[in-house]
Structures are given as C-alpha cells and as structure tokens.
Image (cartoon, helix red, strand yellow):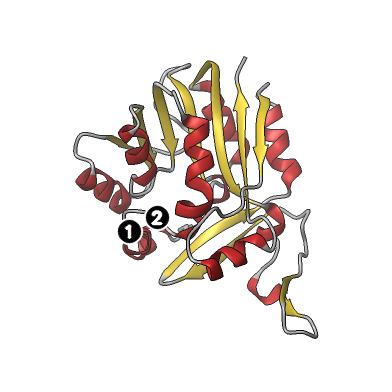
C-alpha cells in the first residue's frame, strides 16, 4: 500500500524550498539544532530532501541521511553533492551497532508503520552516551481530523479531539501533498522508547520564536509539536 510520498515528492520539494516551512524554520529548527550541537556523527532518519542534514553539516557534524523516497534523495544529493544520502528505511537501518552519537527523527515517526521496530533500530545504531533526538506532532493534534475543527460563539476556532487512544493511519493533504500519517497516543511512543532502555533527558513543547505574527498565533494556541532527547547508557 502506497504512503503517498512518491506521488507527493515534487509538491513537497516545492513547499519546503531551502528554508523549510514555517513550523520548521520558526518553531522546530532552533531547539533541534541545540540538541544536536557538538554531535560528531549524526543519522537523520527520513531526511527527505536533505534540509536538516545540510544544516548539521554547516555546523561541523558529519551527517548521513536516509530516506525511502527516490525523488527526495535525488534532490538532497543535487543540493548537497558532498553529502551522504542513502536509500533506507527506519525499520532496517544498514549500519553497524553504535555508529552514531546522534540519531534524529525530525517529524518522521508519524510516517512509520512499525514504530517499535524503527525505535529499536535507532537505538541499536546509537553509541553509548549518544542521544536519539525527536521532533514529533503532538498526539492530540493528530487525533483532531479537519472535520473536528469547531467554532465557538465568538467565531474562534478550536480542535475537537476524538479517538485519541486508537492508533491508526489517516490520509492528510495540503498544497498538493497527500500522505499517510499515523496517529498514536503518547503512551505508545513512550513505551517504544522505554523498551529500549533509553533515558529521557529533554522534553519540550516549543512555541514560535519569530516569523509572520499571524502564522505564529496559529501555533501558540496549543503546542503542535514536542521535542525529546533520549540517551543511551
């Protein structure tokens, strides 16, 4: 069953551009880069068109990106010919144990059907003392489908969350992109990470720090994302 990425690759590349969308540029990049500071070797799982790998490489980190989508990898290689971009999936990482001191999942866990398998592989290739750095959509957001948006008497829009505890894949679309994302309750993510013996070292729900004020207001109503760092003993 297709996940939509092959069909949506061209629209995704156009939408991301060089800087990324608003959420990446003005909400997530700053905390994610801070958690990756000082990394020697990093693996970006689901690197897409390579934008975050380029940011890491510009800061002195030897970054390797993997992704299953050929068109996204082709763009990553064209934009960064000296970079290391490989075809691969999170559930079967083609690297030896303890290969990296940072493993990064930047809005990719929502794309992966086998969460436990992927987390186990990320933990396997992480060196002792290294960290798995995650940015993910907050589960209450993925549990709120577009038809669950409601307006109160003043006209303000709110999310109505439903079926929160039910893990499921749903199709989402915007600006020519149509992909399959997974909703999971937070307990599913936590269980998969704790099963690997990882220790939670950082948790945040970052707010926008700049950019267009109207767009920032949309992200301040409730935290759209969480950012975590899990350390391997």
Q: Are marks 2 and 1 in contact (CB under 8 Å)?
A: yes
Q: In the image shown, does 86 or 233 lie closer to the viewer?
A: 233
Disc marking residue 169: none
Residue 27 in the figure: left or right of residue 200 = left
Q: Which residue lies under the disc numbered 2? A: 20
Q: Position of residue 46 (x, y in %)?
A: 43, 43
Count numbered badges in the picture.
Answer: 2
Q: Position of residue 119 (x, y in %)?
A: 58, 33
Q: Position of residue 16 (x, y in %)?
A: 37, 58
Distance of label 2 from label 1 (alpha carbons) = 6 Å
Q: Residue at x 36, y 54 (%)?
A: 19
Identify the secondary structure beneath mark 2: loop
Q: Is residue 107 visible?
A: no
Disc marking residue 17: 1
Q: Residue at x 73, y 49 (%)?
A: 185
Q: Is residue 228 visible?
A: yes
Residue 6 position by quadrant: bottom left
Mark 1 neighbour density, 10 Å: few (under 14) some (14–19) many (20 or more): few
Q: Residue at x 35, y 46 (%)?
A: 51
Measured along the vertical axis of the image, is residue 102 above or below residue 8? above
Q: Residue at x 36, y 40 (%)?
A: 55
Measured along the vertical axis of the image, is residue 78 above or below residue 214? above
Question: From the image, which quarter does the C terminus lie in?
Answer: top right
Q: In the image shown, does 213 or 77 lie closer to the viewer?
A: 213
Mark 2 neighbour density, 10 Å: few (under 14) some (14–19) many (20 or more): some
Q: Position of residue 133 (x, y in %)?
A: 55, 33
Q: In the image shown, does 145 or 170 lie closer to the viewer?
A: 145
Identify the secondary structure beneath mark 1: loop
């Amino acid at each position: 069953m297709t996940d939509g990425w092959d069909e949506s690759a061209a629209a995704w590349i156009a939408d991301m551009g060089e800087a990324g969308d608003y959420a990446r540029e003005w909400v997530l990049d700053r905390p994610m880069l801070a958690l990756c500071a000082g990394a020697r070797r990093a693996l970006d799982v689901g690197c897409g068109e390579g934008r975050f790998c380029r940011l890491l490489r510009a800061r002195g980190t030897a970054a390797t990106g993997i992704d299953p989508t050929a068109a996204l990898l082709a763009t990553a290689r064209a934009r960064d010919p000296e970079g290391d971009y490989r075809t691969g999936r999170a559930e079967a990482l083609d690297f030896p144990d303890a290969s990296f001191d940072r493993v990064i999942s930047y809005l990719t866990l929502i794309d992966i059907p086998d969460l436990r398998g992927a987390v186990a592989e990320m933990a396997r290739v992480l060196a002792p003392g290294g960290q798995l750095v995650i940015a993910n959509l907050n589960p209450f957001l993925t549990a709120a489908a577009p038809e669950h948006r409601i307006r109160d008497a003043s006209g303000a829009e709110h999310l109505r969350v439903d079926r929160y505890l039910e893990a499921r894949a749903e199709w989402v679309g915007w600006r020519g992109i149509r992909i399959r994302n997974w909703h999971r309750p937070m307990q599913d993510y936590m269980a998969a990470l704790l099963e690997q013996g990882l220790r939670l070292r950082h948790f945040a729900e970052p707010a926008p720090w700049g950019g267009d004020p109207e767009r920032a207001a949309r992200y301040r109503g409730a935290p759209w994302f969480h950012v975590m760092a899990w350390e391997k003993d």
